[in-house]
């Protein structure tokens, strides 16, 4: 099975529990204003890769990942834009006995068949915004509804979810928007925690290298006061936060 792979990396405590082998696939249907990896937005930015070759590479780290209580995360881009390739990788990882995670916006959740969901131990679900109009501003395309449907489908199958929410001053930080995200997450019984991710501008150089303007070049990262207010809003809905 051939897919478009942008890159892979080893991370700790960022993309799921323990130390992770993270495969970043190329291609995404959304164009989020705060995207820090514009080089993963199009499949042409990736490298044609056979799933067997990627699994061979993962197998080199198998023992280390198990000892480190980690596993494999398939991220993007948007991995559900390449469902067959994603399923093949996750299935191979499960056969190795590795913990598996999927990092997704859920926008293409309807493409994930039951066979793919059967390979998952965890989903990192990026809820861009809770207010539909704000969601549209953030992503510049698409609708919030598919993400919500996907979250409930995961819950129906008992799959744990870690919600991710990017806090951007002047874009996603409105109290009503945060409360709406919290309400969505609180209504999904398998949500274990919410990660409030502060906006940063570390991807600015990637935009420059691609000859693209960075839409939020003048936006400052949130300060600790705003971060704590946002976390408190999630806690008020009974949710654990980071």
Image (cartoon, rainbow, N blue to C red):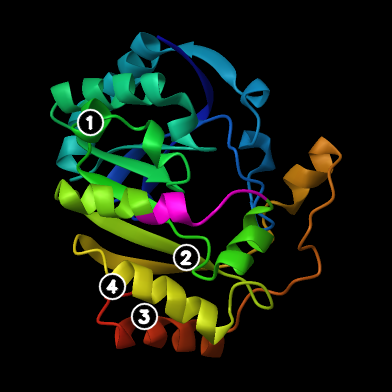
In the picture, measured across the screen, residue 6 lies left or right of residue 192, that is right
Mark 1 to mark 2 CA distance (whole Å): 26 Å
> Which badge, 1 or 2, is on the more N-terminal residue?
1
Question: Foreground mark, 2 or 4?
Answer: 4
Badge 2 crowding class, 10 Å Cα cut-off, few under 14, some 14 to 19, many 20 or more, is many
The part of the image, by quadrant, that contains residue 52 is: top left
Alpha-carbon span between mark 3 and mark 2: 11 Å
- Nearer to us in this view, 76 or 190: 190
Q: In this view, does 8 lie above or below 53?
A: below
Secondary element under disc 1, as helix, strand or loop, is: helix
Image quarter for residue 113?
top left
**Against 197, is 220 above or below?**
below
Relative to 104, say whether 94 is above or below. Answer: above
* Quarter of the view holding residue 117: top left
Q: SS of the residue at dot 3?
A: helix
* Picture residue at 38% right of the left edge, 87% below the top: 232
């Amino acid at each position: 099975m051939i897919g478009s792979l942008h890159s892979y990396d080893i991370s700790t405590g960022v993309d799921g529990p323990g130390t992770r082998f993270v495969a970043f696939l190329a291609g995404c249907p959304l164009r989020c204003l705060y995207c820090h990896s514009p080089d993963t937005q199009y499949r042409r930015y990736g490298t044609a890769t056979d799933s067997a070759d990627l699994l061979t590479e993962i197998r080199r780290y198998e023992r280390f990942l198990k000892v480190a209580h980690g596993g494999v995360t398939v991220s993007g881009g948007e991995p559900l834009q390449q469902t067959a390739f994603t399923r093949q990788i996750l299935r191979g990882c499960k056969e190795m006995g590795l913990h598996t995670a999927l990092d997704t916006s859920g926008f293409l959740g309807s493409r994930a068949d039951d066979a793919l969901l059967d390979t998952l131990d965890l989903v990192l679900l990026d809820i861009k915004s809770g207010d539909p109009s704000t969601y549209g501003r953030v992503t510049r395309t698409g609708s919030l509804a598919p993400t919500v449907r996907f979250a409930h489908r995961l819950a129906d199958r008992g799959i744990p979810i870690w919600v991710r929410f990017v806090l951007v001053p002047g874009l996603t930080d409105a109290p009503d928007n945060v409360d709406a995200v919290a309400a969505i997450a609180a209504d999904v019984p398998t949500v274990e925690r919410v990660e409030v991710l502060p906006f940063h501008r570390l991807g600015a150089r990637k935009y420059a290298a691609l000859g693209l303007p960075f839409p939020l070049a003048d936006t400052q990262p949130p300060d600790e006061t705003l971060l704590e207010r946002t976390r408190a809003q999630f806690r008020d809905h009974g949710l654990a936060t980071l």
